[in-house]
Amino acid sequence: MITAEQAADLLKSNPLPLKNQVTTLMDGMGMYTAEPATAKVAVPPFDNSAMDGYAFRWDDFHSQKPMKIMGEVPAGETQIKRLEKGTAMRIFTGAMVPKGADTVVMQEKTRVEKGLLWIEDAQLKQGANVRKAGSQSACGDELLQHGQKLTPGALGLLASAGVSEVCVWEMPAVSLVVTGSEILALGKPLLPGQVYECNSYSLLSALSQVGINANLFYASDTTADLNHMLETALETSDLVLVTGGVSVGDYDLVVPTLTELGVDCVFHKLKQKPAKPLYFGTKGEKRIFGLPGNPASVLTCWYVWIRPYLFNAMGVSKKDVYQQAILENDYRQKPGLTHFVKAYLESGKVRVLAGQESYRMDAFAQANCFIKTDAQTEEIKAGAQVNIILFG
């Protein structure tokens, strides 16, 4: 049995190999950049007006004389216009500021009489209402870092800077194999000794949050069934997640079956709670996680091990999920294991929730983080600073 720290090092030394590809912006939605994305043009590409109004020279405004209005500049006008001294131009939002002008006054702060412009804005400052060329980004500026998710905002940023394609990581093919002769699909009446299957609901939804649609297989606790399902999953997937059957009972057949299928065990069993029997193995470039069947253990493994493992493969920095907070209530544990304690974080304070047992999901329905404790810890008093792992 190894420590959580040793497991983390072994996962880093056995990363999930991924390929990258160049894709259009819309096809890349939800994917992660495989290299930085840079601007093709400056944004804005020219000085433009932030509102409907009048463009003029600041020095002419200080002469306390009205300015003659000489034409207008609508949005989309491609002809470069020039402003003569002592004059102003009608301008509209997004239109290119004429050469010689440096300030725009909003139309509500003006008075026009006989073709002359009077400015009635005592608070007006030089440069007001002008969006300077390159004020968002210059041509060649890095817009997105490696490992950044393509969100609607990110896609809009890239498009505004003339970027039509982006290099992204291909999402891995993932299979989930749910094992157990005692599990039953929702909608069917339970018989004595049966429980409703819930691990697929938590894991498939968790995978979808990072943009992965996984294949789902069910296997009973028989060698033949398990061998067939695991072999199929390994043939079709880059990453295989298995729930149940990874402990040492008579019906825990996952680990020996994986061995028969040529999977090399990297580690099996961690000094952690919950999910002590966690398994990780490799077969060529394929990666396999074997998770305990208890539902809280399954979801703990996702947040603590599998999600970070996927993000590391894509160069995604998630330092923001590791924070510190002040503990609101006392917590005691038996030393010897690293604990991941379901908790609720609010306004910098974190509260341990009731129902920490690995079979219970009620605490998970309320929790938004784990408190991570050291294996040597026996008691943490309220008011102490603790390490947390956010679910977000």
Image (spheres, rainbow, N blue to C red):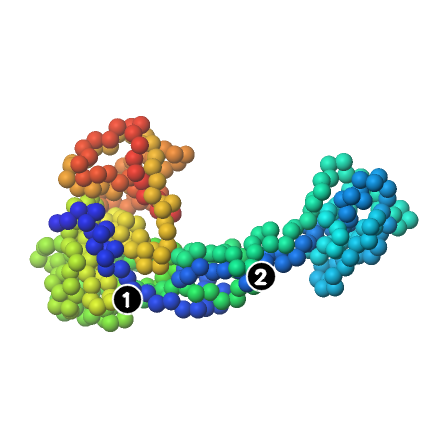
* Displayed quadrant of residue 217: bottom left
- Residue 344 or 355: which is nearer the viewer? 344
Element assignment for label 1 = loop
How many residues crowd around disc 2 within 10 Å: few (fewer than 14), some, or many (20 or more)? some
Crowd class of label 1 (few under 14; some 14 to 19; many from 20; radius 10 Å): many
Return the x and y of residue 267 as percentages of the image width and height. 16, 55
Task: Specify the farthest residue to the left.
Answer: 250
Place of residue 298 in the rendered image (x, y in percent of width and height, measured from the top left): 25, 52
Q: Quadrant of residue 92?
A: bottom right
Q: Are marks 2 and 1 in contact (CB under 8 Å)?
A: no
Of labels 2 and 1, the one closer to you = 2
At label 2, the amino acid type is Val
Does residue 221 show up? no
Question: Disc 1 designates what residue?
Answer: 238
**Do we see residue 284 in this rendering?**
yes
**Residue 237 placement, left or right of 22:** left
The disc placed on residue 41 is 2
Residue 175 position within the rendered picture, expressed as x and y whole percent measured from the top left: 28, 64
Q: Residue at x 80, y 40 (%)?
A: 62
Q: Earlier in the sequence, mark 2 or mark 1?
A: 2
For image coordinates 84% across by 55% down, the residue present is: 70
Q: Secondary structure at mark 2?
A: loop
Q: How many marks?
A: 2
Q: Which mark is residue 124?
A: none
Horizontally, residue 151 falls left or right of residue 96, namely left
Which residue is pictured at 23% across the width and 59% down the height? 14
Task: Name the amino acid, label 1.
Answer: Asp
Q: Residue at x 44, y 56 (%)?
A: 145
Residue 354: percent from left, percent from top: 27, 37
